[in-house]
Image (tube, rainbow, N blue to C red):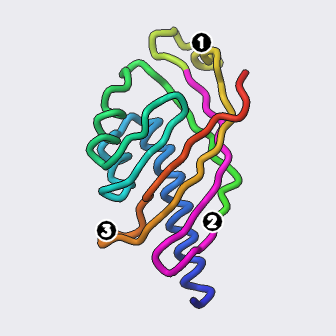
Amino acid sequence: MDELKSLLIERACSRLVLLAAEHADQQRPAEFAALFAPDAVLSRPNAEPLRGREAIHAAYAQRPASRITRHVVTNIRVELLSATDARATSTVLLWAGSTDDEPGPNGRPARAGQVLGEFDDRFTLTPEGWRIAARQASFLLHG
C-alpha cells in the first residue's frame, strides 16, 4: 500500500475516534451509532457489550438529557492491518457534570469520578466507508 493511501486510512480512523467522542458528548445517539459497522460490538466498563448499531443507538439514546460529558481524546495511534482493516489505541480523559447544577463564572462543577481510560478500536472498510467494527473501552485511573 502506498504512503498516501496509508495516511488517508489513518486519518479516516482517527477521525472516527474523535467524532465518536463528539457525538457522545453532544448527545447525538444516531450519529454516534452510524460511526459503527452494522454488526459492531461496543464493550464498555461495567456494562454488557452492545452488539449492533441498533443496540448502540438505543443505549446512548437512554442517557439522561441533563448529563454533561467531555471526552478528551489523545495519543491516537492507528495501525493498518490490511487494506480493509485497522486498529487504534487512544487515551481518554472523561469528565462529567450535570445541567442540574447552576453554572458559575468557571462553568458548572464537575461531578466526582473523573476517569482516565483507553479505547482499543478495530476498524473495517464498509460500503459506507471506514467504520468502527469493535470498541473496547476501559478505565485505568479515577479521581
Kindly report the secondary structure that dominates the magenta region of the rendered protein.
Answer: strand
Q: Which residue is mark 3?
A: 128
Q: Which circle's residue, 2 or 3, is located before the other in the chain?
A: 2
Amino acid, disc 3? Glu
Question: Which circle's residue, 2 or 1, is located before the other in the chain?
Answer: 2
Q: Residues within 10 Å of mark 3 (few under 14, many from 20)?
A: few
Determine which residue is flagged by label 2.
78
Disc 1 crowd, CA 10 A, few/some/many (<14, 14-19, 20+): few
Q: Which residues are magenta?
A: 79-96
Note whether 136 is above or below 98 in the view shown. below
Q: Which residue is mark 1?
A: 104
Distance from Cα at disc 1 to Cα at disc 3: 43 Å
Q: Is residue 92 magenta?
A: yes
User: Quarter holding the N terminus?
Assistant: bottom right
Mark 1 touches mark 3? (CB < 8 Å):
no
Q: Where does residue 131 sit, x and y in percent of width and height?
A: 41, 62
Say which residue appears at 57% left-offset and 16% top-offset. 108
Tell me which numbered mark, 1 or 3, is placed earlier along the sequence.
1
User: Residue 79 at x, y = what percent?
Assistant: 63, 69
* SS assignment at label 2: strand
Q: From this view, report whether residue 45 is shown above or below residue 21.
A: above
**Residue drawn at 31 percent across, 68 percent down:** 128
Magenta segment: does it hold 137? no
Q: Nearer the viewer, residue 3 or 22?
A: 3
Circle number at residue 50: none
